[in-house]
Image: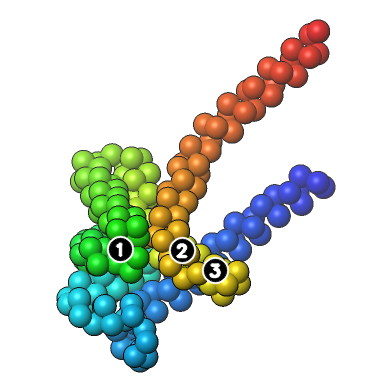
């Protein structure tokens, strides 16, 4: 009975996390698609910088928005197995979104709010995003689908930094009422490093879990033997 409830709880947790991720992807991608059309007040310094920046703003917002919108579809094992053509088509669109979003983000990082303190963080995010996606596509072309999926998982983790960025800003500014610049600089670095660290933990968890279980078994065996 306990084992059945554990399976039910684990399944419910996975579905809850998946639905939350899909909802956040839809919400943030919708924001990205509509940002350039939203009204901005005269005191909005970030919007003023974006207005003077040029084509890198729509390239970043539309590209990143498209990649974020397609991320849940790319993560779906069911879609990949049942409709592989759809997986490949959305994968091509996702890659195009990363290309435009990453290059636009790299350009925007040169005049980010907060100067180099935040700009370097965003620049490294753009480089890592483009690199992981490029490596993942390279493995797909070469037929190594296992490594392809692992590297695309890293790419999607970096795509989801758009979500983590806004959650960090929301908590830091809205809930904790911390100074904007300090929160923004922290978010510029943490939004992607935390995501990437969690992705690496997830990718290596089976091996970590096996080692922990083996260590636990050996410890119990040693205690029993003694």
Up the image or down, 81 lies above or below 165; here it is above
Left or right of 23 on screen, residue 151:
left
| Residue that badge 1 annotates | 115
Is there any visible trace of residue 156 in the rendered image? no
Q: How far is disc 3 from disc 1 in space, using C-alphas? A: 19 Å
- At 61% from the left and 63% from the top, the residue drawn is 16
Q: Earlier in the sequence, mark 3 or mark 1?
A: 1
Q: Residues within 10 Å of mark 2 (few under 14, many from 20)?
A: some
Where is residue 107? Give x, y as percent.
20, 64
Q: Earlier in the sequence, mark 1 or mark 2?
A: 1
Mark 2 and mark 1 in contact (Cβ < 8 Å)? no
Q: In this orientation, which residue lies closer to the viewer: 40 or 23?
A: 40
Mark 3 and mark 2 in contact (Cβ < 8 Å)? yes
Q: Residues within 10 Å of mark 3 (few under 14, many from 20)?
A: some
- At 69% from the left and 21% from the top, the residue drawn is 217
Where residue 182 is drawn, which disc sits there? 2
Where is residue 211? Give x, y as percent.
58, 26
| Residue that badge 3 annotates | 178
């Amino acid at each position: 009975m306990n084992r059945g409830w554990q399976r039910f709880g684990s399944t419910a947790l996975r579905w809850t996390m998946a639905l939350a991720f899909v909802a956040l992807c839809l919400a943030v991608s919708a924001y990205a698609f509509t940002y350039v059309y939203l009204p901005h007040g005269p005191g909005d310094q970030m919007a003023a910088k974006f207005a003077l920046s040029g084509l890198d703003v729509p390239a970043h917002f539309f590209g990143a928005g498209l990649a974020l919108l397609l991320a849940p579809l790319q993560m779906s094992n069911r879609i990949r197995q049942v409709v592989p053509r759809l997986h490949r088509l959305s994968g091509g669109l996702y890659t195009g979104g990363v290309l435009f979003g990453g290059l636009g983000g790299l350009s925007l990082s040169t005049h980010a709010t907060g100067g180099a303190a935040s700009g370097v963080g965003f620049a490294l995010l753009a480089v890592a995003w483009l690199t992981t996606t490029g490596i993942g596509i390279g493995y797909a072309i070469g037929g190594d689908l296992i490594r392809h999926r692992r590297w695309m998982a890293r790419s999607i983790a970096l795509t989801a930094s758009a979500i983590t960025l806004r959650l960090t800003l929301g908590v830091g500014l809205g809930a904790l009422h911390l100074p904007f610049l300090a929160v923004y600089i922290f978010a510029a670095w943490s939004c992607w490093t935390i995501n990437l660290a969690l992705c690496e933990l997830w990718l290596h968890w089976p091996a970590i879990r096996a080692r922990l279980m083996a260590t636990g078994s050996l410890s119990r065996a040693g205690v029993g033997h003694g």
